[in-house]
Image: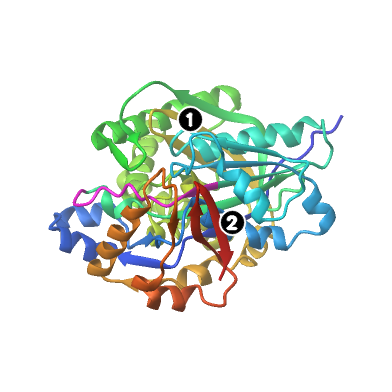
Amino acid sequence: MAMTSVGIESMNLYAGPTYVDVRDLFTARGLDLERFDNLMMRKKSVALPCEDAVSYAVNAAKPIIDRLTPVERSRIGTVITCTESPVDFAKSLSTYIHALLGLDRNCRSLELKQACYAGMGALQLAAGVVGSGFTPGEKVLVIATDTARATARNTYAEPTQAAGAIAMLIGDRPRLLDLDPGAHGCCSYEIMDVHRPLPELETGDPDMSLLSYLDCLENCFRAYAERVEGADFQTTFDALAFHTPFAGMVKGAHRRMMRRFGKAAPAEVEADFIRRVAPSLHHCVEVGNIYAGTVFMALCGEITAGRRAGRIGLFSYGSGCSSEFLSGLVPEGAAAHLDAMAIDEGLARRLPIDVATYDRILDLNDEWRFGIKDKEVDTGPYADLYDAFFAGRGLLRLKRVSTYHREYEWS
């Protein structure tokens, strides 16, 4: 029996309405500008109080759903959301998303959590559903969505903590990424590097997290190489895309791998980074860390900026920790297919805000803490931003919370 192709059919990034310049944020917070260059970040996307993880998810997924035929839409049998910005301890975000996208009721609705690894885990679960053949032609909608309300002000983590959502349709016609069957390696162990003991508190040991990321990347690739005969870090992959807490961390991780597995000289490392890794940072440096969706934002960047077909290696790390390295083929025509989502144009439409405005938005966002029973959204305090980005554009936004139930409307 022929092996069924399984992978990503469509994908889209939604990074919200506003951004703050990362260098401006460094200066305003009195952070050491020598560390700014190591960060390698330019902009950080910022969510408004009329948005949440549900609205971000729907705004990412709707352009994909709108392009499907009624028959294709009816084949979506599972919706999986991945988030660190939940709105309920029991009810998954996917229930709201499923309804707002008008999907068929014959559908599973689930939520997955494992820090920034959850998106990769959901992809593997979705691939299992599609590849099993139990329901021929079934598709899975996977959405990683976060709004980073737990922003750690006045720390070096703050410039990286962003808002964004990646939506992916997983099926048997992979136009963007055709997964290599069985080609993966995992590494997981218990560690308290970065964690959320409260809904609005993200804390931990960033140095420990950096070391764990590097350890997991090396051991994931070793596990991958045990499964894939002849796998070589330098020659097997035409491109690489890693989970990107900040771009400088990816550059350091790539350098370590090139030295560890290829004993590469500095000039060779730099040339390889520019060729195989830098395109994946195309969106990441403009948005920031969007948690479970970040590795797929890197994949979008590689497809959009790299514009090449070939084998790509993907690495996902989630604090706590769980991680995975896998590979797949980016088919011919992938860039043209992704271009239809107009991701670069969406990022260009975002509105720049200064640090004072950014701080006011954070204060307003703080009023929307987890567990609100009744509250009406008032866009008045940021009417200029709302009108410039949302008015008349048919984007979803939060309208109110009524007896804990979230109500949304289209702009």
Does residue 206 appear left or right of residue 171 in this picture? left
Pointer 2 residue: 58
Report the residue at 46% width, 31% height from top. 323
Label whose residue precedes the other's in the sequence (2 or 1): 2
**Residue 136: x %, y % from top left:** 84, 38
| Residue type beneath disc 1 | Phe
Front-most of residues 130 and 48: 48
Report the residue at 80% width, 53% height from top. 72
Query: Quick check: is 291 in the magenta stretch?
Result: no
Front-most of residues 104 and 29: 104
Query: Quick check: is 145 in the magenta stretch?
Result: yes
How crowded pointer 1 is (Cα within 10 Å; few <14, some 14-19, many 20+) is rated as many
Q: Secondary structure at mark 1?
A: helix
**Residue 98: x %, y % from top left:** 66, 49
Task: Identify the disc placed on residue 185.
Answer: none
Numbered label tally: 2
Pointer 1 residue: 221
| Residue type beneath disc 2 | Val
Identify the image quadrant of the C terminus.
bottom right
Does residue 183 appear left or right of residue 244 in this picture? right
**Residue 96: x %, y % from top left:** 60, 49
**Range covered by the magenta-colored residues:** 144-155
Mark 2 → mark 1, Cα distance in angstroms: 34 Å
**Residue 170: x %, y % from top left:** 69, 45
